Image: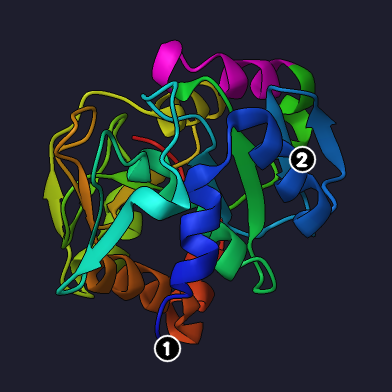
Amino acid sequence: MDLNLDYLSHLLSLNESELYNHIFQEIKPNFYLDDMYLYLHKDDNLPCLVAHIDTFFSVKPTKENLVIENGILYNRIGGLGADDRAGVYALLELKDLPYNLLFTNYEETGRNGVKRAIQDIKDVLSKNTCFIEIDRKGTGHYVDYVGAEDEFLDIFNKIGLHKERGSNSDITDLSSELSIASVNLACGYHNPHTDEEYLNIKELQVVIDLLKDPSLIQEVSKRQFRTR
């Protein structure tokens, strides 16, 4: 299935407050704190998808300045913000599947959104089988920041992803505090935090299709995976 470029462009153009309100209407979260996080807990013992709504850029692209050429999306006059609006788009595309959903704010400035979520709703977050973040540059790999058990990482190794090193993201805090395994999946944006940032549409769609796969959902739902 092809990406909905109009919808993706709309998400890229919204400021954080506008996007928070849009997500609220789309997922009807049962746990939330204005400006900090939104969490939809459908059931215990489900995997949780994670994305952050803030971007590195204070000025968001206008739809008129977004350009798509040969499957590459970029902003003609500044930063794109696909880090992490690509992840937000993916979670909204996957919202009807058996995943819990966590959207955070302020990942780019200290991860205060996820830290507040852990403070507020640690017990319910602890009911997830794992955390899968969609907030990694490039394609074809994942990052394990804290050290997940091998059986969990093998799920992603077996579908052809390879492990790379990374510094941190929201799942760093989630795994560190809850001792639940996590990975951050590469989702097709490149050159983040620069005016040369771009998004490869096909690479984002690959990750969405991967997470739609019933066999993958079954694997990451079968039990709670822990950190080592």
Nearer to me, 165 or 84 = 84
- When the figure is inspected, residue 20 is found, relative to residue 47, above or below; the finding is above
From the image, which quarter does the C terminus lie in?
A: top left
Residue 219 visible in the current orientation: no
Q: Is residue 5 left or right of residue 155?
A: right
* Residue 65 relative to residue 4: left or right: left
Can you identify the residue that label 1 sits on? 1
- Residue in front for this viewpoint, 189 or 103: 189
Q: Give me the C-alpha separation between circle 2 and circle 1.
A: 27 Å
- Residue holding disc 2: 21
User: In the displayed structure, would residue 5 be above or below residue 137?
Assistant: below
Q: Which quarter of the figure has residue 102?
A: top right
SS for dot 2: helix
Q: Quadrant of residue 110?
A: top left
What amino acid is labelled 1 in the image? Met
Residue located at (55% from left, 55% from top): 10
What is the magenta segment's predominant secondary structure? helix
The answer to whether residue 5 is left or right of residue 114 is left
Q: Which residues are magenta?
A: 108-119
Q: Residue furthest front?
A: 64
Provide residue 117's location: percent of width, then percent of height. 68, 24
